[in-house]
Amino acid sequence: MFDSSNRSDASRYPEAQSERDAWIRALRPNLEERRRSLPIDRPSAWLWESEPVGDGRERPVLTVFLTNRECPWRCLMCDLWQQTRLDSVPPGAIPRQIDAALSQAGSIPAGTRLKLYNAGSFFDPGAIPTVDHVAIADRCRGFDRVLVECHPSLVGDGRRIREFAEQIAPARLEVAMGLETIHPEVLPKLNKRMTPEQFSDAAQVLKRIGVARRAFVLVQPPFLPAGNAVEWAVRSAEFAFANGVEVVALIPTRDGNGAMEMLRRSGEFTPPTLSLFEDAVDAAFQVGGGVLLADVWDLGRFSDNPTTFEARRNRLEAMNRVQRILPRVGAANGLD
């Protein structure tokens, strides 16, 4: 059994699945007091964004970060738990959070998309009370599309998801799932408790019930050498598109949750450089099959060359819009 007081145990990632939750939690910074006091009647944050839709155009997006309980899966690389409460929110809290965001956001332009991110799975009843679905749907109908996240194991036969999709009509529902990687040795170590086959099954269910699909793919996750990072990012994106996913977002793997810092110290994780991320995005654009998006949030942390960073980020954003590879800039002399 994992012993968090044992220094050698704390530096070694457990082989046993049953011990990984405890290892991940033991290495977290202590944020319990702040998490316990997070208000339940307003979201953690909200913001306006724009997102490419695959034909050179962009749509406005209102993204709302809902406050609820922590995701029960505790994936190795996740830091989203830092914005969650220690307990489940009561019925009515989530609709009030959405109301708070809508009241501050002001007028909603035609064609706006709504992202409801809850640091876990929207269809986890311990996070988003099922009795609130009707009230949430009432607030979604004026949008063009509504994006939520879900662990593949919660898709099931799709019945609950189809019901919610019908409730928000004429808005269309899109469900995003973390594929992360299809590497046969790395994926099991991420504590996601999912296989590529389970992801595929969930994607097929969503397709059958008419729900749009999105996948998140990590670039250079832990336990994967940098020399293999581009290949497996591309193979993972290709797998997602082949299974009916319409949008794939490539995400450079970050640290910041305690566990990832420990893996850095043990040599089992190295964050990707900006150059490596660009290599992965360029290679994945050659796969085709759907919309590919490079996640540029907090991208500067992967760059050691501030003089070229803005131009390189702008290039990736432009590639997201036009959906094709553009000439590389500012990567001379191996600087990131």
Image (spheres, rainbow, N blue to C red):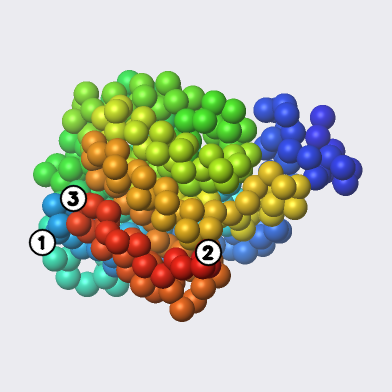
Q: Residue at coordinates 18% horizontally, 60% vertically from top-left?
A: 58
Q: Residue at coordinates 53% horizontally, 39% vertically from top-left?
A: 228
Residue 106 visible in the displayed image: yes
Q: Secondary structure at mark 1?
A: loop
What residue type is disc 2 on? Gly
Q: Quadrant of the N terminus?
A: top right
What is the number of the mark on residue 54?
A: 3
Graded by Cα atoms within 10 Å as few (under 14), some (14 to 19) or many (20 or more), the crowding at tag 1 reads few
What is the number of the mark on residue 334?
A: 2
What residue type is disc 3 on? Gly
Where does the image place residue 4, in percent across and percent down from the top left?
82, 43
**Sequence-first disc among 1 and 2:** 1
What is the number of the mark on residue 236?
A: none
CA–CA distance in space, label 3 to label 1: 18 Å
**Sequence-first disc among 3 and 1:** 3
Does 124 appear above or below 11?
A: above
Q: Are marks 3 and 1 in contact (CB under 8 Å)?
A: no
Q: Nearer the viewer, residue 119 or 269?
A: 269
When asked about the image quadrant of residue 51, the answer is bottom left
